[in-house]
Image (cartoon, grey):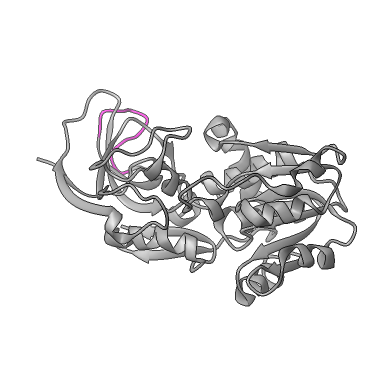
Amino acid sequence: MTTSRRITLATRPTEQVALTDFGSDEVELPALQKGEILVDVEYLSIDPTIRGWMAYDTYLPKIGIGEVIRSAGAGRVVESRNKAFPVGSRVFGMPGWQTRAVMSGGVPIPEGVSYEQALSVFGVTGLTAYVGLKDIGKPQPGETVVVSGAAGGVGSIAGQIAKIMGARVVGVAGSPEKCAWVVDELGFDDCIDYRAEDVAAGLRRTCPEGVDVYFDNVGGETLNAVLGQIKDHARIILCGAISQYNTGAPAPGPANLINAIPRRALLKGFIILDHMDRAGEAAAEMGRWLAEGKLQSRTHVLEGLDSAPLALQELFTGANVGKSLVRV
């Protein structure tokens, strides 16, 4: 008998996610069917989208009460009925918050790539930043790119990619320490501390000629402030809206949205599940940038399966710097 210890959804949150929204249990896993693998889960990816899955139907159905919390993660294959994933190989997929998972497949993790790298720069986090900049933002040398959530997993990589593409990059983050990190270590040209300075004023200070590309991870007032500062033919990459995930009701539309009309701006949302065919391309290019010292990746790791709810909370309090993970 194979069992798995799980973190489950106990109550559906309406505002700030609470530790009491989670339960735990131990379940017996079914025997493997053809094409399936049994994985010892070693790392979990903690992403803002989990909060959305807990509360409502999105591009995936909401998590059911009593079901395991849906999450990306990685681990080692301990039993296999899939020739593509032999016993002992490592795999990235969607195991959820549990110690063992039956999966129908995933993405093999190459030798020499750590779990932390596989779940950050080489995983969905890096791919999200890559596709958003390459396909939607398309910054040109000398253009100004603003990235919110700049010290988070996606934002920190997005800003670095924009620099590699020749843009001037301004981050928006939530502390002096985070701003110092993205400027001094990651190479951003400037950073606005939204806790210490009005974002609209900060944009006028750091982007006096306006904003060409905005990589939006937070939505809300920051998005509204940027819309008031965009240049003609600006591109707005709508990746996330973490400032609004814990609100009980939808926020009203940004007042400055009307500015997109005379500025002929593009606002485009995207879901990375539509772009998984680009994973190989993105991994190859970012691997080269890592080797050349042009790209850095930082992780914020909590220990133990039981720390996963706290890790999710920390995304919304700003306690993390870099990609948030749980080492199971």
- Residue 30 at x, y percent in the picture: 16, 32
Q: Position of residue 50 (x, y in %)?
A: 42, 47
**Residue 224 versus residue 183: which sits nearer the camera?**
224
Instruction: Quarter of the image for the C terminus: give it.
Output: bottom left
Residue at 76% x, 48% y is 256
Q: Which residues are magenta?
A: 80-88
Q: Is residue 291 visible?
A: no
Residue at 48% in and 61% down: 316
Q: Nearer the viewer, residue 89 or 56?
A: 56
Q: Is residue 68 left or right of residue 166?
A: left
Does the stretch in magenta take in 203? no
Residue 191 vs residue 119: left or right? right
Image quarter for residue 326?
bottom left
* On-image quarter of the N terminus: top left
Question: Most prominent secondary structure in the magenta stretch?
Answer: loop
Q: Is residue 292 above or below residue 85?
A: below
Q: Report whether 179 appears left or right of 99.
A: right
Question: 229 or 154: which is nearer to us?
Answer: 229
Q: Position of residue 277 (x, y in %)?
A: 56, 30
Residue 125 in view, yes or no: yes
The verdict on residue 87 being magenta is yes
**183 or 8, nearer to the observer:** 8
Residue 141 sits above or below residue 206 on the image: above
The residue depicted at 54 percent of the width and 62 percent of the height is 322
From the top left corner, tell me how far across and down residue 66 is, in percent. 23, 43
